[in-house]
């Protein structure tokens, strides 16, 4: 019979052999999920023996992680902006950088009411749900081309007790008509990775996260161009468009925005000092 500590040690060694980053943390996160406790609470249970059933389930999780499946897909959720989001392979795992995108919209529109907002490529619904939690939004559309993603996003709205988001399974470039007229705010974290960079991503991403959420299979700018075009026609005057940026894309995206009549361009850096968020106002 193995104890909690012995099981963690064995899993850690196995992950290290597989070159999985943060092997010990991964081993602990999976076991904490299995035992339904916080990771740090495991330290109070080191001598607790694991039952055969627990051990079998842990083995199964370890084997999935050993095949490079992200921890978040194995345990089924990720935290974003202080909220819990259900994830599976049909949605991108929300990233900490994207919290900066959400934060910059919230700080700009705090205290303003009756906003009409659109989130393009909502995925797990993380951006839309956080905005709805923090701002006074009258109408919020969240679109995605994947019906599986929309399904997860709806579950996340329910999980986070958010009502009134209009989830739409459609491509905005395919005759999408805004159901509530023009928008005050359009936001997107588009698939911005280039075809070349995509090939070099770590196995966890390459093998498990949805390719269509990550790359345009071209130069990484396709979605910026089409969303800017759409937004130029569908934002109110003085409406704003907010994007997350990939590394090194700031100049190109700024130019795309300016060419379509966007001004007052603002850029924000992430925790690693990378230009991560860009916004422009339609004048
Ligand atoms: N809106 C989601 C996020 O920001 C999904 C984005 C995407 O799939 N490209 O995490």
Image: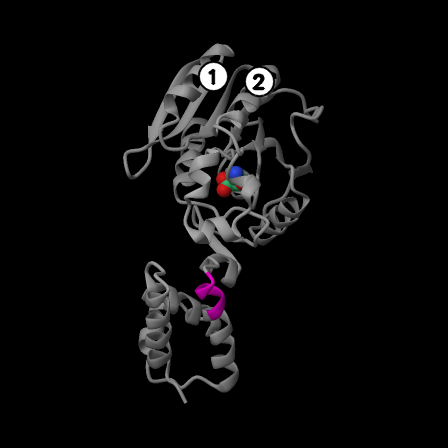
In the rendered image, which quarter is residue 216 located in?
top right
Instruction: Pinpoint residue 225: horizontal percent, then vertical percent.
Output: 53, 21
Instruction: Pinpoint residue 215: horizontal percent, then vertical percent.
Output: 51, 36
Identify the secondary structure beneath mark 1.
Answer: helix
Q: Badge 2, how many Cα within 10 Å: few under 14, some, many 20+?
A: some
145 shown above or below 203? above
Instruction: Pinpoint residue 141: horizontal percent, then vertical percent.
Output: 63, 33
For the N terminus, the image quarter is bottom left
In the image, the segment drawn in magenta is: 63-67
| Label whose residue precedes the other's in the sequence (2 or 1) | 2
Q: How is the image coloured?
A: one colour
Identify the secondary structure beneath mark 2.
Answer: helix
Residue at label 2? 229
- Quick one: 51 or 110, which is closer to the camera? 51
Q: Which residue is at a point 37% across and 20% down the rendered structure image? A: 251
In the rendered image, which quarter is residue 279 located in?
top left
User: Whole-Å distance between the Cαs marked 2 and 1?
Assistant: 9 Å
| Residue 110 makes an appearance in the image | no
Q: Which residue is at a point 60% across and 46% down the rendered structure image? A: 153
Residue 17 is left or right of residue 204, and the answer is left
103 shown above or below 41? above
Magenta residues: mostly which secondary structure?
Answer: helix
Q: Which residue is at a point 40% across and 31% down the rendered structure image? A: 104
* 17 drawn magenta: no
The circle on residue 185 is none
Residue at label 1? 256
274 shown above or below 124? above
Instruction: Pinpoint residue 257: horizontal percent, then vertical percent.
Output: 47, 16
Q: Badge 1, how many Cα within 10 Å: few under 14, some, many 20+?
A: some
């Amino acid at each position: 019979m193995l104890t909690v500590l012995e099981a963690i040690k064995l899993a850690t060694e196995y992950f290290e052999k597989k070159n999985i980053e943060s092997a010990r943390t991964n081993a602990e996160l999976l076991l904490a999920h299995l035992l339904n406790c916080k990771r740090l609470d495991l330290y109070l249970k080191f001598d607790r023996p694991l039952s055969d059933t627990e051990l079998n389930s842990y083995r199964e999780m370890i084997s999935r992680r050993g095949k490079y499946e992200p921890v978040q897909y194995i345990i089924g959720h990720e935290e974003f902006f202080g909220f819990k989001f259900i994830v599976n392979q049909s949605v991108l795992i929300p990233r900490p950088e994207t919290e900066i995108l959400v934060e910059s919209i919230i700080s700009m529109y705090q205290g303003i009411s009756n906003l009409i907002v659109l989130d393009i490529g909502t995925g797990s619904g993380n951006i839309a749900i956080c905005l709805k939690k923090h701002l006074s939004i009258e109408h919020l559309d969240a679109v995605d081309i994947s019906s599986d993603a929309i399904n997860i996003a709806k579950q996340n709205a329910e999980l986070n007790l958010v009502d009134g988001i209009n989830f739409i399974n459609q491509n905005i470039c395919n005759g999408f008509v805004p159901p509530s007229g023009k928008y005050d705010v359009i936001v997107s974290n588009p698939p911005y990775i280039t075809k070349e960079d995509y090939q070099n991503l770590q196995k966890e991403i390459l093998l498990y996260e949805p390719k269509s959420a990550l790359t345009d299979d071209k130069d990484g700018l396709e979605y910026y161009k089409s969303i800017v075009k759409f937004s130029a026609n569908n934002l109110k005057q003085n409406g704003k468009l907010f994007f997350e940026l990939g590394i090194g894309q700031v100049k190109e995206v700024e130019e795309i925005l300016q060419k379509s009549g966007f001004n007052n361009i603002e850029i924000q850096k992430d925790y690693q000092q990378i230009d991560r968020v860009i916004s422009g106002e339609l004048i």
